[in-house]
Image: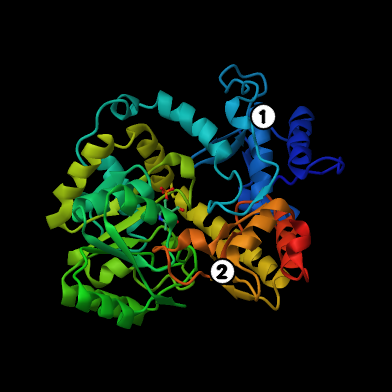
Amino acid sequence: MWVPQLNDLNQPMYLSIADALARDIANGVLRHGDRLPTLRELAQALDVTPGTISRAYSEAQRRGLMQGEVGRGSYVLDPQAKDRLPPPAAPGPLALGRAEVLDLSIIKPSGESLEYWLRDALVNLARSTDFADALDYAPDGGHPAHREAGAQWLRRSLPHAQWQQVVVTAGAQHGLMVAMSALSGCGDLVLCEALCYPGIISLAHGLQRRLRGVPMDEEGIIPAALRDICQQERPALLICVATCQNPTTASMSHRRRAEIAAIAEEFDFLLVDDDIYGFLAADPSIAPLAAYAPERSVYLTSLSKSVMPALRTGYLYSPPRLLSRLTSMVRSSVWMPSPLTAQLASNVITAGLDEQLIRMQRDEAAARQALAAQIFRGLVVRTQPHSYHLWLELPEPWSADEFTLLARAQGVQILSGSQFQAERGGALSRGVRVVLMSPTSRDELAFALTRLASLISTPDPRRFY
Ligand SMILES: Cc1ncc(COP(=O)(O)O)c(C=O)c1O
């Protein structure tokens, strides 16, 4: 296995690795076609994160030194070859306006793990014989091949998933919008967790549904509280994030899932199981909520958190009786999610790259959780071993809004618990959501977390106003 000799330690590690690759090609140590180590292998050998190797490979690819191919790995390129990607143009508008804050507010996978792969994947897609299909209108629900790739992804948690019950969406937010619009009507009661993903709150307002938050404990929705609400009024839907809940990280046990499903049966409402974080479960053997009531559940996921948000590809899995309502809502909303990105997503899944990425992201999240546990020692933290985020309960007399404001003034962006309250006017939570995966490096994360910890212990933070 090729392991670079790193000479210049006065520059970022990823540049030193790219330089070493260039040097070894020039002096004949590496030749055209030689296989390069995987991100994981090289990260282990150099004792750095896979994100650093990914950046190094991305840089090497930009210089035309190597290429990555789905399913084959990464190879050294012939430096004289004409047939390689042109170097990227000068930074475009997306590079402008990067904020000067450490952003711990967006839940996303760490690193640019797929950036180097995507450069070649885009070119390979353009050259492939399927390209013409990906440029045309797709049938309802998506191309059968894209639905089959979706079913393959879903079989990780729903082992009997069939492609005929899969609907391709433009991400999980679109899936939520499709499910809420297709399965409830204007003015209907929609239930969710009392502290919930803000995308659900904005959707319910936009679609004029009455949203009610169900009280929670460390496993999420409390069955007795759900039952109380159902005895007053019949909900059309319950939207639930049963694993690594956003924002509290609450995760339901097998028993809790069975109890929630039984209440849905008893009071005859539908379940929308938003399992976007299911791949981060501490115990992957616990089946998704939808599996406990498959005839009345729509299962929902996307590749945004495991692969990359920009794919905008997600999947709904529906019992046959609800399928046509969902597919016609996809048509009404966007006609079809882009088959181009659905094809890229399918390539990731059929090449097994998704499994590699999941392993990598779970490991990275676990390392970052360990770091947070160390820095936040003595504070009240709710989390899961592989969660991308954690929930920090602030000590008295902090309020979540005041803390979030002052953290921002100190250059660290987080979200206050008040942004997650399903209903306005309830008791304000004293928690904040801290995302661990958004900083590019663990060092950057440690720096930001240390700032938060020292802000918490500041005797009178009003001096920062
Ligand atoms: C619980 C939950 N559902 C859905 C989404 C939306 O995901 P996507 O980017 O795939 O639209 C998010 C994003 O943070 C989320 O946390």
Asked which quadrant contains residue 341, the reply is: top left
Residue drawn at point x = 76 percent, y = 57 percent: 464
Q: Residue furthest left?
A: 321
Query: What is the number of callouts on the image?
Result: 2
Per the image, label 1 sits on a secondary structure element best described as loop
Gap between marks 2 and 1, in whole Å? 48 Å
Residue drawn at point x = 61 percent, y = 19 percent: 81
> Does the numbered disc 1 mark a residue whose Cβ is under 8 Å from ligand 1?
no
Q: Which residue is at the front of the view, 70 or 131?
A: 131
- Amino acid type, callout 1: Leu
Task: Tell me where residue 363 appears, x and y as whole percent.
Answer: 59, 62
| Pointer 1 residue | 65
| Pointer 2 residue | 431
Residue drawn at point x = 71 percent, y = 57 percent: 448
> Badge 2: how crowded within 10 Å, few (<14), some, or many (20+)?
many
> Does the numbered disc 2 mark a residue whose Cβ is under 8 Å from ligand 1?
no
Q: Is residue 42 above or below residue 221?
A: above
Task: Tell me where residue 463 appears, x and y as whole percent.
Answer: 78, 61
